[in-house]
Amino acid sequence: MNKYMTRQRKILLSFLSAHADRQLSARQIAESLQEENISVSAVYRNLAELANEGKVRKISKSKSREIFFQYTDNEACRDCLHLYCKSCGRTYHMDTKEADSLVENLARNEGFAVDKTATVLYGTCEDCLNKEDRGK
């Protein structure tokens, strides 16, 4: 069921879709939308509704009590595995062929069916690895 599209919800969805490669806390989102006159409570309320509708993914990170949100209601995110870089905070879409191969291997070898819409793999991206290597 689609929610009534308020001005605040439109602005929030626009912001989230423009930052779909990021995992942001409600606080970060509210601070970014402060000039749009969107209350913190409206951000929290809309994020909860969007999560229930499957338009954003709620993410908890180890060593943090904060919940993060990522926009997933676009074609690129549907049925996709995500790679999250712990160094720079960017989220990447895993190559479809590679993701399908990984999921198929897990199903065949481990008897485990992966829910790609809810799966994020954590590590370090190539850019950050290269920066680390240059720093040595």
Image (spheres, rainbow, N blue to C red):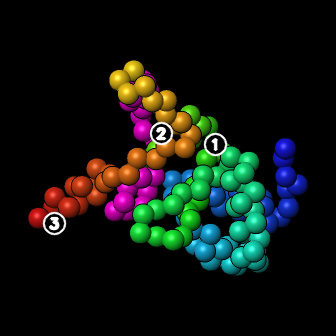
The N terminus, quarter of image? top right
Please say whether residue 103 is one of the residues in the magenta stretch: yes
Residue lying at 20% horizontally and 61% vertically, measured from the top left: 132
Q: Eyeballing the image, is 101 above or below 40? A: above
Residue 74's label in the rendered image is 1
User: Would residue 42 be found to the left or right of residue 16 on screen?
Assistant: right
Q: Eyeballing the image, is 117 above or below 64? A: above
Q: Which residue is mark 3?
A: 135
Kind of element beneath mark 3: helix
User: Would residue 75 be found to the left or right of residue 136 on screen?
Assistant: right
Q: Which residue is mark 2?
A: 81
Q: Are marks 2 and 1 in contact (CB under 8 Å)?
A: no
Q: Specify the amino acid type for callout 1.
A: Asn
Location of residue 108 by image quarter: top left
Q: Are marks 1 and 3 in contact (CB under 8 Å)?
A: no
Q: Residues within 10 Å of mark 3 (few under 14, many from 20)?
A: few
Location of residue 103 by image quarter: top left
Kind of element beneath mark 2: loop
Q: Of residues 47 and 95, which is closer to you in this image?
A: 47
Residue occupying the far right of the picture: 4
Residue 29's label in the rendered image is none
Q: Specify the amino acid type for callout 3.
A: Gly
Q: Is residue 18 visible?
A: no
